[in-house]
Image (tube, grey):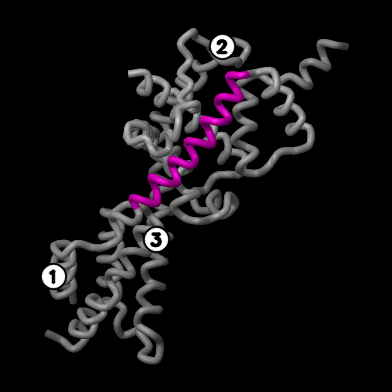
């Protein structure tokens, strides 16, 4: 009985880190929320993963934004190339 | 030069930057965006007779471009499923090896706690490491984790765009982030 209860409540680290990601995408059910909370309370490696996951997201956002700003325009040589193709087309 | 070519060239000078910016925003690839803008103007010359003078050329060109972008994603998700299958399979085995037989962390003594580092997001080394680690991911995993910021869309819309179910989507994100974490762990040590 106790073992069965433990199995319901205790997630593996693989499952727990999965729920950390699922939470951001679809949200969690009440049961999943409780399972994750208990796991994180017991497991420092997964607490560490959760922090790292948030940091990776924030860094990703910064990287994506700065690439967007750096490369907003068509350069002149590409423009000339496309213009030539428009002229050549029928 | 024909009247039609003259008009299309005029449009090119006026609108190509806006069209390019939009394509880049949607695809995050300069090369692809350049192709899409070129294709848009070639389609415009071919379909010129269908252009109704009453409509705004900018609106018309954007409509063409948007169709091109949709086609691009359609093709891409199809080819990605084939091309990426091997890379994904390999990386999937790799993420499985992060855990032991009970699916708990395979812990070693020298855990790298880079999340405790002071102001790590402003750290130039960290940025380089992370950028390199992102490049090493299979392409559709990369697309999955970046699309949230690239497309400014919610999870449901992204899933439609990259053709995965929502539960598939967070599982891909899970694998991608585990792989990223391990990659950062390894590189941060040195």
Q: Which residue was labeled with disc 3? A: B69
From this viewpoint, which residue is outermost toward the top?
B109
Image location (x, y in percent) of residue B102: 63, 12
Q: How far apart are the alpha carbons under marks 3 and 2?
A: 43 Å
Q: Does B151 sit left or right of B103 as displayed?
A: left
Above or below — where is A81 with respect to B73?
A: below
Assess whether residue A62 is covered by the magenta stretch: yes
Residue drawn at (33%, 56%) of the image: A69
Give the extent of the magenta segment: A44-67
Q: Is residue B30 left or right of residue B146?
A: left
Q: Up-down: is A61 above or below B116?
A: below
Is label 2 or label 1 in front? 2
Q: Nearer the viewer, residue B127 or A18?
A: B127
Quarter of the image with the N terminus of chain A is top right
The numbered mark at residue B100 is: 2
Q: Which residue carries the number 1 mark?
A: A84
Q: Nearer the viewer, residue B10 or B134?
A: B134
């Amino acid at each position: 009985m106790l073992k069965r209860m433990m199995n319901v409540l205790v997630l593996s680290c693989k499952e727990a880190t999965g729920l950390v990601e699922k939470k951001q995408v679809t949200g969690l059910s009440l049961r999943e929320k409780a399972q994750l909370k208990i796991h994180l309370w017991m497991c420092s490696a997964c607490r560490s993963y959760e922090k790292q996951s948030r940091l990776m997201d924030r860094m990703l956002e910064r990287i994506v934004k700065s690439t967007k700003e750096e490369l907003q325009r068509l350069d002149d040589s590409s423009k000339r190339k496309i213009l030539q193709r428009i002229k050549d087309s029928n | 030069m024909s009247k039609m070519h003259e008009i299309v060239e005029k449009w090119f000078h006026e609108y190509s930057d806006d069209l390019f910016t939009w394509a880049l925003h949607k695809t995050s690839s300069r090369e692809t965006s350049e192709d899409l803008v070129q294709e848009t103007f070639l389609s415009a010359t071919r379909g010129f007779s269908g252009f109704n003078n009453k409509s705004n050329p900018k609106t018309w060109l954007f409509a063409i471009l948007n169709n091109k972008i949709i086609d691009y994603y359609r093709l891409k998700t199809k080819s990605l499923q084939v091309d990426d299958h091997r890379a994904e399979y390999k990386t999937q085995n790799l993420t499985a090896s992060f855990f032991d037989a009970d699916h708990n962390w395979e812990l070693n003594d020298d855990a790298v706690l880079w999340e405790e580092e002071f102001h790590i997001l402003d750290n130039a080394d960290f940025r380089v490491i992370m950028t390199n680690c992102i490049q090493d991911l299979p392409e559709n995993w990369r697309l999955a984790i970046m699309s949230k910021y690239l497309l400014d869309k919610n999870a449901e819309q992204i899933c439609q765009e990259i053709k995965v179910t929502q539960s598939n989507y967070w599982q891909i994100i899970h694998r991608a982030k585990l792989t990223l974490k391990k990659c950062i762990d390894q590189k941060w040590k040195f």
